[in-house]
Amino acid sequence: MLKLKSKITALKAGKNPRAQRSSVFLDGKFAFSLANEVILKEQLKVGQELSSKEIEILTNADSFQSCLNAAFHFLSFRPRSEAETRQRLKRRGFADEDIRRVISKLMQLGLLDDNAFAEFWKENRTSFRPRSSGMLKAELQRKGVESEVIRNVTEDIDDMENAYRLAISKARTIPVVEYQIFRRKLGGYLERRGFNYGVINSAVKRAWQERRQDSGSHPDLPEEVDAIN
């Protein structure tokens, strides 16, 4: 006679407590492991009988939960874009359907929002590592953020102000004895952060004048100067 159901004969915690998984034994033999969240949610217990369809539902729920837990861990370090999260889960080997469901769940929970992510990225860069709006846009594009979101988030960035802040900070480490040396070092520093010629030239001049004033020197500049050779 064909057996339609299998009985849970044991639920044993896994050897690695951090994994938070348990082994399920059916009819005295190990059958599969499940995340503890799934076991609790489905209220599994010893003596319970499971059909093949119920076992399939449980393993599908476990696959989704594992994918969701991986996403939670990935997002615990800092906000991420939707594309970043999707790529991360794909590299971990999760099924496309589980990834789709997890992304949808994270968006419902407010844990995945490209508008909020782009704002976070802009504020972080502006506060700690200023750079040009063009370089910031390129970074967000690489993160998979849509063009419209990038445009809305970056439209109020003041390249002149950001370049000046960077220039003043960096200028403290550059001698003010000779303008050409000061210009070359500071201009190159700003260029590597994506600022254009006009912005760099203005920021370098302002930084030179302020540094010379701070040191008690006359802040005169050569008649014709360029920010970068």
Image (cartoon, grey):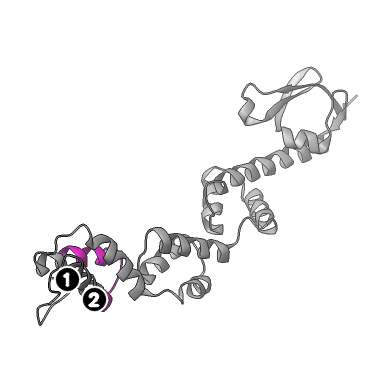
Question: What's the CA distance linking mark 1 and mark 2?
Answer: 8 Å
> Residue, x 22% and y 76% (percent of image)?
201
Number of numbered discs present?
2
Q: Is residue 190 magenta?
A: yes
Q: Is residue 187 magenta?
A: yes
> Residue, x 72% and y 32% (percent of image)?
36
Determine whether, in the image, residue 17 is placed left or right of residue 87.
right
Residue type at the position of mark 2 = Tyr
Helix, strand or loop: magenta stretch: helix
Q: Which residues are magenta?
A: 185-199
Q: Position of residue 162 (x, y in %)?
A: 35, 69
Determine whether, in the image, residue 105 is placed left or right of residue 121.
right
Q: Kindly give the residue lying farthest to the front in the view shown.
A: 216
Q: Kindly give the residue lying farthest to the top in the view shown.
A: 28
Q: Quadrant of the N terminus?
A: top right
Q: Residues within 10 Å of mark 1 (few under 14, many from 20)?
A: some
Q: Kindly give the residue lying farthest to the right in the view shown.
A: 1
Determine whether, in the image, residue 116 is placed left or right of residue 61.
left
Look at the numbered discs 1 and 2 and tell me whether their residues touch, using CB distance below 8 Å.
yes
* Residue at which label 1 appears: 228
Q: Position of residue 229 (x, y in %)?
A: 13, 71
The circle drawn on residue 197 is: 2
Q: Position of residue 78 (x, y in %)?
A: 52, 51
Query: Is residue 182 or residue 176 the one in the foreground?
Result: 176
94 up-or-down from 108: above or below: above
**Which quarter of the picture shows residue 212?**
bottom left
Residue type at the position of mark 1 = Ile
> Residue, x 68% and y 29% (percent of image)?
21
The circle drawn on residue 188 is: none
